[in-house]
Amino acid sequence: MKGEIQVQSMKFCIIGSGSKGNMTYIETKETKVLLDAGISFLTAKKRVKDENIDFSDVSAVIITHEHYDHVCFLPTILKKTKATLYINKYSYDNLEKTIKDKIPRVKIKFLEADTRYRIKDLDFLTLKLSHDSANIFGYVFISEDKRLAYITDTGFFPLKYIEIIRNVDALIIESNHDVEMLLESERPWALKERILSPNGHMSNHICQQLLIAVLNEKHKIVILAHISLECNSVEIIESQMIPEIKKVFSGDIILAEQFRALKLYQI
């Protein structure tokens, strides 16, 4: 109807992204969830103080995988929120003992691959990715007709999910490293091999190829995430990647940050 106000059905905010800690906030009309718990509760609150985000009624904490930078503050966040924990059983079993032993008595829902789950008015789909962890999930969050995909910590993106991410409104995707910078870095060769392997992290080049293949008029926002502080740079991404992606995509391309939250986006 003419003059009708469009109701936004999903909001999201990347509170931190990278090897020093990961957390993303997702909100619908009835549901608030945190994706990963690698940022302290106090730090997260400080970073989003200008976005009117209240963590007190978060109903779920959803975990991608058990690596430290995604779960190190999980016990504290669960205690503060009393939220249900959604995690794969292999990831839960392989949590560091110092973390696992401190998890409070909360409801735990074990997630399986390629399965759709529902929390009130928020659905989410698990995507099985490839990383050197006991298990790793990407997610597609669905509310009404809006979809948000989250894909990080994977050496490559499985072809079977291509059509799924072609049909999302917003895409958070890993652009971890510039291969040349990684190879020239002082990191041990074993670490370089790990990062470059199918069980490692997606490079700028792989991310760029994937985005060029999937982006279309449905996508409104693309956020490049888990950007390495040592083996990547804003300058490289802005001068080499983004101009190529812009040849096929007219929407917003944003870079996630490690020590500062992005604004609260709406789709």
Image: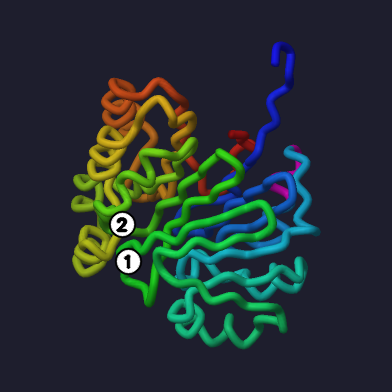
Q: Is residue 48 magenta?
A: yes
Residue marked by disc 2: 201
Q: Nearer the viewer, residue 175 or 192?
A: 175
Q: Is residue 147 left or right of residue 160?
A: right
Dot 1, crowdedness within 10 Å: few (<14), some or many (≥20)? many
Residue 190 position within the rendered picture, expressed as x and y whole percent measured from the top left = 21, 69
| Mark sitting earlier along the chain (2/1) | 1
Q: Quadrant of the N terminus?
A: top right
- In the figure, 104 relative to 133: above or below? below
| Residue 47 is covered by the magenta coloring | yes
Question: Is residue 154 or residue 10 the one in the foreground?
Answer: 10
Residue 175 shows which numbered tag? none
- Where, by quadrant of the figure, is residue 134 drawn? bottom left
Packing grade of label 2 (10 A; few <14, some 14-19, many >=20) is: many
Query: Considering the numbered disc 2 on the image, is that residue within a helix, a strand or a loop?
Result: loop
| SS of the residue under disc 1 | loop
> In which quadrant of the rendered view does residue 145 lie?
top right
Amino acid type, label 2: His
Colour mapping: rainbow
Q: Position of residue 229 (x, y in %)?
A: 41, 49
User: Would residue 255 be found to the left or right of residue 261 on screen?
Assistant: left
Instruction: Give the residue at the far top of this rendering.
Output: 2
- In the picture, the quarter occupied by the C terminus is top right
Q: Amino acid at mark 1?
A: His
Q: Position of residue 109 (x, y in %)?
A: 59, 75
Q: Give the prevailing secondary structure in the magenta stretch.
A: helix
Up the image or down, 153 lies above or below 28; here it is: below
* Callout 2–callout 1 Cβ contact below 8 Å: yes
Residue drawn 67% across the image and 47% down it? 27
**Residue identifier under label 1:** 131
The magenta-colored residue range is: 46-50
Q: How many marks?
A: 2
